[in-house]
Image (spheres, coloured by chain):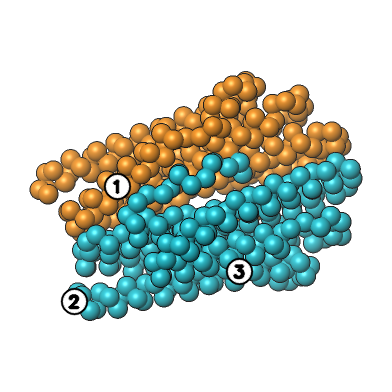
Chain colours: A orange, B cyan
Amino acid sequence: MERHHFEEELQILKQRLLHMGALCEERVHRAVAALMQRRLDAAEKIAAGDSDVNELQIEIDDRCLKLLALQQPMATDLRLITSAMKINSDLERIGDQAVNIAQNVVKLLPYPPVKPQIDIPRMAEIAQGMTHDSLDAFVRKDVGLARSVLARDDQVDAFKDQVFRVLLTYMMADPGTIERCLALILISRNLERIADHATNIAEDVIFLVEAKDVRHHHVEEKVT
Amino acid sequence: MERHHFEEELQILKQRLLHMGALCEERVHRAVAALMQRRLDAAEKIAAGDSDVNELQIEIDDRCLKLLALQQPMATDLRLITSAMKINSDLERIGDQAVNIAQNVVKLLPYPPVKPQIDIPRMAEIAQGMTHDSLDAFVRKDVGLARSVLARDDQVDAFKDQVFRVLLTYMMADPGTIERCLALILISRNLERIADHATNIAEDVIFLVEAKDVRHHHVEEKVT
């Protein structure tokens, strides 16, 4: 494979990863919208699975393996391609979390809404922003943007703890709300996992650009 | 790098992955034992973090990158090394789940034990067996063993659903137990995630040996 052709293939790989990211983000957005608008049909559609995301994951992995085999790339290109494989996995798992959110929404919707204002929409917004920016940082090799993703992970954890405390108090006061509150707690955990995957992607970007492993150095381990 | 030396390096890589797997399994085992024996000191020790696992993850990733860069391997060897990188991530996340289990145990132990017999120990045993066998399947390229890991994932999901139902009924009957029951539900989710990571590893093994992508074809998506 010529260098010129290789560069073209790398561009296509990046485009496919961006497309994968956009699909996953969109699914998270729609799952949370189904919750807020209380739309069972929309939730069921997402809960049914994500075959387009899964097919794209396999395609991207295949592109990476071919690039590694045919080009035998060195140094930066090698790290770019192995990072793309890891990012691809994280994106697919973000897609899985959207499915899980939708399945929890399906369980929740038969019940009337819970009273307390909880910050699931804000949490979802931050997690989606992190996903989007982590991928953008990958494509642009923007370490500053990647670091801003790491910083936002703590906000999502704080929201998760707050949602847990508020709903715990609420269900202790009114045990009739236990099932609804549990579904909401699980949804907040799904969103936290999405933020964790975006954090993994951002760490891969920093490693890629700085050839420095930042994993396990920026935050304390967190309870999930 | 000569072929002979390359084979030696691959053997070392496999040994390091097995060591990583053993460390992670051990941590899961100790976290669940701390729950069963109600030992706060043991739980706190694991909850404090897993720096040895994290360092080993970075070392293994580094070995993989070096092998890819220096040897420029083709076909099977290439897939072996990229699989090792993915398996390494999954193992590290299994280690994270052990930390999360221990953190939930720390929250749980101030309360008296809950009455209902729940199958957390059995669930933990299956998840640990899956982790162990998936790695064994990798080292021995044993597709039959890898498929047996996939089959066990459904058992873990069934246990997770059962734990959820039993504890939901229990806390609705006695709201004073909500906090304890929630911690146990979260621990059962942690164990389910461990089984999911072992399933990912088993899928990588089948792909490695058969060069066939089995992801997304063996089971329905599940709610988490």
Seen in the picture, residue A224 relative to A178 is either above or below; the reply is: below
Q: Give the residue at mark 2.
A: B2
Element carrying mark 1: helix
Give amino acid for label 2.
Glu
Q: Nearer the viewer, residue A136 or B133?
A: B133
CA–CA distance between discs 3 and 1?
34 Å
Residue B219, image x, y percentages: 52, 45
Residue at 42 percent of width and 52 percent of height: A203
Residue A131, image x, y percentages: 45, 39
- The circle drawn on residue B108 is none
Residue at 45 percent of width and 62 percent of height: B144
Q: Is residue A136 left or right of residue B43?
A: left
Q: Which callout, 3 or 1, points to the residue nearer the camera?
A: 1
Location of residue A221 (image quadrant): bottom right
Check whether the beta carbons of the residues at disc 3 and disc 2 lie within 8 A of each other. Answer: no
- The circle drawn on residue B27 is 3
